[in-house]
Image (cartoon, grey):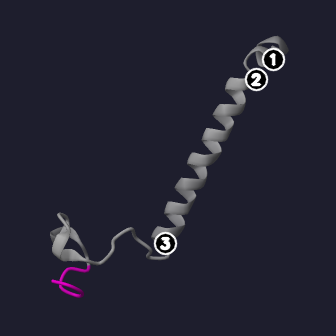
């Protein structure tokens, strides 16, 4: 078992770093969603998803 870990330590470290980054991104997205923060800029005139936006009619339409 220890030999396998020693032979694959690079892969294990890179995988752990990637898992940590993905987890941090997911938690950040969840936190932003709970706080009402979105990536929407509020300019519905150029948005292809304008019809599905909850803010339609309140800003630039």
Q: Is residue 2 left or right of residue 51?
A: right
27 is higher (above) or lower (below) than 3: below
Q: Is residue 42 left or right of residue 20?
A: left
Q: Mark 3: give few (<14), some (14-19) or many (20+) Cα within 10 Å.
A: few
Q: Quadrant of residue 28?
A: bottom right
Q: Which structural element holds mark 2?
A: helix
* SS majority, magenta: loop
| Pointers 2 and 3 in contact (C-beta within 8 Å) | no
| Pointers 2 and 1 in contact (C-beta within 8 Å) | yes
22 is higher (above) or lower (below) than 49: above
Q: Quadrant of residue 5?
A: top right
Residue marked by disc 1: 6
Q: Mark 1: give few (<14), some (14-19) or many (20+) Cα within 10 Å.
A: few
Farthest right residue in view: 2
Residue marked by disc 2: 9
Q: CA distance from mark 1 to mark 3?
A: 42 Å
Mark 3 or mark 1, which is nearer the start of the sequence? 1
In the image, which residues are magenta?
A: 55-61
Residue marked by disc 3: 34
Q: CA distance from mark 2 to mark 1?
A: 5 Å
């Amino acid at each position: 078992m220890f030999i396998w870990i020693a032979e694959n330590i690079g892969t294990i470290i890179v995988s752990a770093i990637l898992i940590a980054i993905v987890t941090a991104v997911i938690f950040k997205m969840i936190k932003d969603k709970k706080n009402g923060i979105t990536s929407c800029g509020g300019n519905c005139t150029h948005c292809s998803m304008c019809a599905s936006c909850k803010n339609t009619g309140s800003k630039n339409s």
